[in-house]
Amino acid sequence: MEFTNAFRTALLVSYAFYFCMIRERQLRYLVLSYAPSAISESSVPIAVILFEPQAICTGFCKAEFGARWKEDVLRLDPEADIGNLELFRRDVDVQLGRSESRAALLETIQDSFSNAIRISVSGDCMAEDPTEELRHLSSAYL
């Protein structure tokens, strides 16, 4: 059986599309924002967390804090406790780096945060390169 060139091309494009889709990973992102108080409606985004919800312990899971997050927080709230926020930043980095503590931290962030640090935006996306996607999300939100 001989295939026409058009059929071969269509078949190759279909396979290429299929294999590209397989390599893409399902990801979820959270944009964390700082607010001066629990009742404050004004906030400033400080970090993006990107993770694979289907593979919390073994998949990609990282946070990126904005390059000027401290300045942004102080512009919004000159009396903000930057020391505590810096401890929070370090704790997030450490816990996301440990596969055994990721799920608990992400659950706490999604369920319990409502005061100074809150989720301002969340969503799902697909990407072949999660590190590049994190950079893209950070430049869009931070």
Image (cartoon, rainbow, N blue to C red):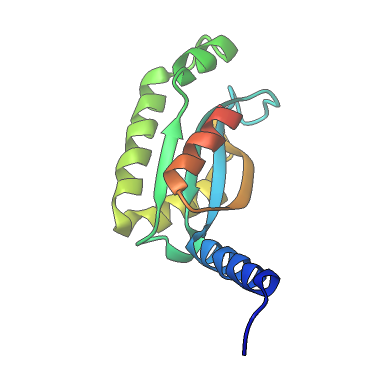
Please state, as top left, top right, bottom left or bottom right, where the N terminus lies in the image. Answer: bottom right
Side of 5 relative to 52 (left or right): right
- Name the residue at 62% across, 31% down: 38
56 above or below 50? Answer: below
- Where residue 107 sits: x, y (%)? 49, 54
Please state, as top left, top right, bottom left or bottom right, where the C terminus lies in the image. Answer: top right
- Name the residue at 55% across, 46% down: 29
13 above or below 42? Answer: below
Farthest residue toward the bottom? 1
43 above or below 31? Answer: above
Side of 47 relative to 61 (left or right): right
**Which is nearer the eye, 103 or 139?**
139
**Which is nearer the eye, 59 or 89?**
59
- Where residue 137 sits: x, y (%)? 55, 37
- Name the residue at 50% across, 11% down: 79
Side of 79 relative to 88 (left or right): right
**Which is nearer the eye, 68 or 92?**
68
- Where residue 39 sits: x, y (%)? 67, 29
**Which is nearer the eye, 86 or 31?**
31
- Where residue 33 sits: x, y (%)? 57, 31
Count of marks, rendered view: 0
